[in-house]
Image (tube, helix red, strand yellow):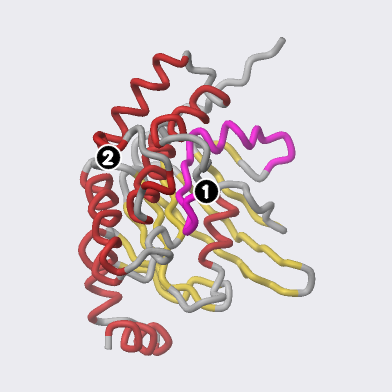
């Protein structure tokens, strides 16, 4: 039986993700219209844009939850849009945190974090539990490892979801509006975890409306509208001196 091998990490200076002329349509509706981006190892890229601009679809294509209509996504040297791609292998290496927490209500926090390790990575139960407890401690929930989702706040549930993704030891983390379903007072705890991940060198692509996070944590900020990248630059450039009139109007609206 042939064994699936994980591609070697990109060499120094090569992007960990290279997006080439990516298109995605749903029927007659074009959602992504020729996206090309490079994301380097350890980089934190924040994607901004109005509703319907294609931000979430871009992340879902990166994680292969959506099949692009055309174009390429080269992840660690592998074209993950190719027909024979092992999608489960891609998702082991590229974790994703969604707006909704998607926790199993009948499992406590530690078992929610253990499940994918056991099912996908085939880790022994004792090892999966050790790693789950380590990741729950990392997101500040060590003392709530035996709590069920309905015993946790929304922010705590989202931190369990982050721990679950981290337990798979991904090389890249994708965050799709990870705080938008939370009450305002619960947002900070999740953003603090994301900040710590960024400071630890995790490669991150973050779709968010949290402008302070984009300003303070991002290495690059991308503004999308109509399925295209309108502007791509350092936070200070994009927030203080946007080149595009459309970017300027959006920033003024969300920070005004």
User: Pointer 2: residues within 10 angstroms few (<14), some, or many (20+)?
Assistant: many
Residue 67 x %, y %? 69, 52
What residue is at 40 percent from the left and 14 percent from the top? 126
Residue 171 seen by the camera? no
* Quadrant occupied by the N terminus: top right
What residue is at 41 percent from the left and 66 percent from the top? 180
Q: Residue reaching furthest front?
A: 151
- Image position of 136 with respect to 21: above or below: above
Q: Residue reaching furthest right?
A: 27
Q: Which numbered disc flags the more N-terminal residue, 2 or 1? A: 1
Q: Which mark is residue 66?
A: none
Q: Which residue is mark 2?
A: 141
Q: Which mark is residue 102?
A: 1
Q: Nearer the viewer, residue 107 or 117?
A: 107
Q: Is residue 21 left or right of residue 225?
A: right
User: Pointer 1: residues within 10 angstroms few (<14), some, or many (20+)?
Assistant: few
Local secondary structure at mark 2 = loop
Question: What range of the chain is rendered magenta?
Answer: 82-101
Q: Residue reaching furthest top?
A: 1
Cα–Cα span, label 2 and label 1? 17 Å
Please check the rendered image and state whether residue 97 is part of the magenta-colored stretch, yes or no: yes
* Quadrant occupied by the C terminus: bottom left
């Amino acid at each position: 039986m042939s064994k699936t091998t994980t591609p070697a990490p990109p060499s120094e200076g090569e992007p960990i993700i290279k997006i080439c002329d990516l298109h995605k349509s749903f029927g007659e509706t074009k959602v992504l219209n020729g996206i090309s981006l490079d994301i380097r190892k350890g980089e934190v890229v924040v994607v901004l844009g109005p509703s319907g601009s294609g931000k979430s679809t871009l992340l879902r294509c990166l994680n292969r939850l959506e099949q692009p209509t055309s174009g390429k996504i080269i992840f660690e040297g592998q074209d993950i849009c190719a027909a024979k791609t092992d999608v489960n292998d891609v998702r082991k290496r590229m974790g994703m945190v969604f707006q909704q927490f998607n926790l199993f209500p009948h499992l406590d926090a530690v078992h929610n974090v253990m499940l994918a390790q056991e099912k996908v990575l085939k880790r022994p139960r004792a090892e999966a539990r050790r790693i789950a407890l380590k990741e729950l401690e990392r997101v500040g929930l060590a003392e709530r490892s035996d709590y069920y989702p309905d015993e946790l706040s929304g922010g705590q549930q989202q931190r369990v979801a982050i721990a679950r993704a981290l337990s798979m030891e991904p090389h890249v983390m994708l965050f799709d509006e990870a705080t938008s379903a939370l009450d305002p007072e619960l947002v900070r705890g999740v953003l603090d975890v994301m900040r710590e991940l960024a400071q630890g060198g995790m490669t991150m692509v973050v779709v968010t409306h949290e402008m302070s996070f984009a300003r303070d944590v991002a290495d690059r900020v991308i503004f999308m509208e109509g399925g295209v990248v309108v502007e791509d630059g350092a936070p200070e450039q994009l927030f203080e001196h946007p080149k595009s009139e459309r970017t300027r109007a959006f920033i003024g609206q969300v920070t005004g």
